[in-house]
Amino acid sequence: MSQQLKIALPKGSLQEPTLSLFEKAGYNIYSSDRGLRPSSDDSDLDIYMIRAQEIGRYIDQGFVDCGITGYDWVYENKVDLEDLAELPYSRASTRPTRWVLVVPENSEIQTVQDLEGKRIATEGVGITERYLAEKGVSAKLEFSWGATEVKVPDLVDAIVDVTETGSSLRANKLRIVDELLQSFPHFYANPNAYRDDWKKEKMDRIVMMLKGALEARDKVGLKLNLPKSALEPVLEILPSLRRPTVSPLADGDWVAVETVICESIARQIIPDLKVLGAEGIIEFPLNKIVP
Ligand SMILES: Nc1ncnc2c1ncn2[C@@H]1O[C@H](COP(=O)(O)OP(=O)(O)OP(=O)(O)O)[C@@H](O)[C@H]1O
Ligand SMILES: O=P(O)(O)OC[C@H]1O[C@H](OP(=O)(O)OP(=O)(O)O)[C@H](O)[C@@H]1O
Ligand SMILES: [Mg+2]
């Protein structure tokens, strides 16, 4: 049988954004709600859906060759993996997940030092232990299986939990005392698997396409025609990610300009270009940007 790459993808919070990133990168993964061994349109891949908390351990043990999981859980599990790329996406936004120490809004606790001898609940016991040791604070740490917000103030004095958009903190009237860690998903490999030429090349190619898809996420392509005399002022207002391509047109007094810009500024720039004399302006979506 031909070789296959065993790859673990996260079940849970990161499942949906991870599968949609793979689709944008060109890999279609066919996953039903309960299916833990999804198939895909790339027969080189042997895919396992595994809880984000455990993926690092399974890569470390060589049960899978590689996988995507949050940096937070690899830090928590203290496993030594080949870190091929940070992939800046999250559950609901493009912001990193933050592990924060939080208390009820009206709590007397203002700093971590106020937690000496107090009780803290968290899913990330290792992350919290290391943080408290760094701060020289000794507190009673309790492992929490989730829904941790409900435990303050009756069961514990503070919790350490992840926040992304902040809506759970607001809904539960909680206040951030300190931030312990920021985390994005990473593509990790087992160091031995990464020494295998075929697997290394396969992983590097997947990482290139994933990064290319993320890079293109909020960018658009822009093409326009211009009288040569307007080129200088136009180049001044184009915040080109890379140098714009300028090509001559059949009419020697005109040039075509092609570039890539952030989608968020297109609505400002396109009318400005028009005022400067641009014609035939085309904005188009991009699938990948590979530098
Ligand atoms: N809004 C978010 N909430 C929770 N985790 C998030 C969020 N955004 C990104 N993540 C990331 O998802 C990964 C898994 O999160 P977590 O450990 O909370 O498990 P989960 O998939 O949310 O399952 P559970 O329902 O048990 O919490 C972590 O690496 C975390 O940083
Ligand atoms: O800042 P936000 O965007 O609101 O995200 C943070 C919330 O997401 C996580 O909950 P999850 O859905 O993973 O459930 P859990 O509490 O059981 O972990 C986390 O524990 C917070 O409750
Ligand atoms: Mg969670």
Image (cartoon, rainbow, N blue to C red):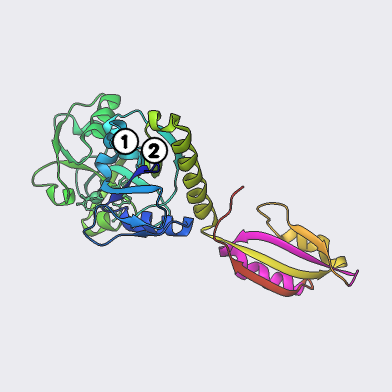
Could you give the CA–CA distance between mark 2 and mark 1, rounded to whole angstroms?
Answer: 8 Å
Q: Residues within 10 Å of mark 1 (few under 14, many from 20)?
A: many
Q: Which one is nearer the viewer's eye here, 94 or 47?
A: 47
Residue stretch rendered in magenta on the structure = 251-275
Residue that appears at 29% across and 27% down: 135
Secondary structure under tag 1 reads helix
Q: Can you tell which quarter of the image residue 73 is in?
A: top left
Asked if residue 248 shows in the view, the reply is yes
**Above or below, comparing residue 276 to residue 52 in the picture:** below
Label for residue 188? 2
Give the residue type that dot 1 points to: Ile
Q: Position of residue 10 (x, y in %)?
A: 30, 49
Q: Position of residue 168 (x, y in %)?
A: 25, 56
Asked if the residue under mark 1 is in contact with the one under mark 2, i.e. CB atoms within 8 Å, the reply is yes
**Above or below, comparing residue 231 to residue 148 in the picture:** below
Residue denoted by label 1: 59
Q: Position of residue 173 (x, y in %)?
A: 22, 55
Q: Residues within 10 Å of mark 2 (few under 14, many from 20)?
A: many
